[in-house]
Amino acid sequence: MLETVLNSRTMEFIPQLAEPVARLHLLVVDADAAIRSACAEIAASLGYAVESTGDLGQARSQLRGRAADILLVNLPPGSNQGLELVSEVKLLYPETSVIAMTASGSVNAAVEAMRCGASDYLTKPFAMDELSTVLDRAAASHLTDTATRQLRERLRLSQGLGAMIGRSVEMEKLYRILSKVAQSSHPVLILGESGTGKELVARTIHAYGPNSQKPFLPVDCGSLVPTLIESELFGYVKGAFTGANQNRRGLFEVAGQGTIFLDEIGEMTMPMQVKLLRVLQERTVRPVGGTSEIPVDVRVIAATNRDLDRQVTEGTFREDLYYRLNVIPIRVPALRERRDDVPLLANHFLKKYAPGAGKSLHGIAAASLEALTGYDWPGNVRQLENTIERAVALETTSELRVELPVERAKARAAAAGAETSFNTTTTTTVPMPGASGSLLPEGVNMENYVAQIERSLLQSALGQTHGVQVRAAEVLGISYRSFRHLMKKYEL
């Protein structure tokens, strides 16, 4: 039975075996017991710790118990189950080297396996020296990847991952997810509050992925005029509309094999959602005014601070597009959920802004650090950065002292007054300093105080209407366009 896998050179090769590999774990998956046994026997003689199975479901279970260093998997003709296993393994265990076994003449299967993440392939029947050579390459690739990963881990533990900063439990969980997700090409949906760093997460996924040298192109779906976003993403042909004097490639085409980052995806109009869904399904784009399809091979990462589940229920976001984008959801924790990272972030921003301000600052005062850590940071990392930048600009000593943002307490008071007013009468009364004859606070800043009240009114209206912005605008007696302008202004 051995000859069904190995040719006549097999037995002649045994005395020439190289030094055993340092006990790398190999999992052999093939429904043919003879092939499975022969491969396991040869690999064991080469020094591998070998496990084998003929069932793909059992292979998944074994991998969950112990991720293999190398996976040798057969791709049965007429079935995609082997390819699905390859894709799953490279997504969940990117450090695992995968070798695909295919029947003679199944070139397409081998090519598909390589696209799914396999590093090498063997065509049956194969000789023992072929198996040995391929295993050696896989072992070398695994050891190189492992060394690279350990180096990245050491760099990451110094403060974070790439440009991301944080050593809290929540960020460690995020790093582990990102290190796996980066190796795949599946769509990613990043969820999180405003200011948490969703674009930085997207850039990290791109930077640690196999196509990191390709373009990363961010698109703010909320800032582009609906009539322009289609031509921006898909391009246009000469004469498609007034001013289209020449053909222009869209970002999906320009990105090549890179990444398109669709920020504020919840702002995209329904007609545009339909067109985006088609691009994701067909992997082609049609320029505005064009008649032919252009193939694209780009990774799509989307982000939003909105509740897309609610939008789907309300009919403002397509359910099919939601599921197409939500293949791998990633939630970015709010800064109040990872307070341990506040001192690290604060010192990072201090080092970032002090040289530009011409300041020689030796650190942040202990009392300030304690206060910063205890603050909830409704604007998250972006608000912390702005606070440190302002403190650096105003500091006159060698140690940075930081005043907390004053918006929070006043916004709460204003929101409470506004909510009471909404619940009792259609006339809104907002508490103002000195309204009851009391003295104005010393050094009151009228512009800032009015901004606090506007922000609190927006929040109260949104709360009263359960987040429905059109109704919130009606409650406040302003146009929807004005409401959206204020939402953008205060980053709500």
Image (cartoon, rainbow, N blue to C red):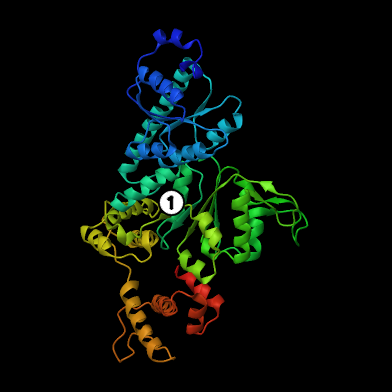
Up the image or down, 167 lies above or below 42; here it is below
The reply to whether residue 329 is visible in this rendering is yes
Disc 1 residue crowd, few under 14, some 14–19, many 20+, Cα 10 Å = many
Q: Residue at x 56, y 61 (%)?
A: 221
Identified at 39% across, 23% down, the residue is 40
- Amino acid carrying mark 1 in the image: Val
Q: Quadrant of the C terminus?
A: bottom left
Q: Is residue 129 above or below residue 52?
A: above
Total residue callouts: 1
Residue depicted at x 49% and y 33%: 118
- Horizontal and vertical percent position of residue 167: 30, 49
Q: Nearer the viewer, residue 42 or 317?
A: 42
Q: Kindly identify which residue carries mark 1.
A: 201
Q: Which element carries disc 1, helix, strand or loop?
A: helix
Say left or right for 254 vs 385: right
Q: Nearer the viewer, residue 190 or 351?
A: 190
Can I make out residue 165 in this image?
no
The vertical placement of 487 against 163, above or below, is below
Q: Tell me the quarter of the picture where residue 227 sits.
A: bottom right
Q: Residue furthest right?
A: 239
- Residue 2: % across, % down: 46, 17
Residue 201 percent across, percent down from the top left: 43, 51
Determine whether, in the image, residue 463 is placed left or right of residue 366: right
Q: Is residue 221 left or right of residue 237?
A: left
Could you say where residue 402 lies in the image, as x and y percent from the top left? 29, 62
Q: Is residue 73 left or right of residue 353?
A: right
As rendered, which of 481 and 468 lies closer to the eye? 468
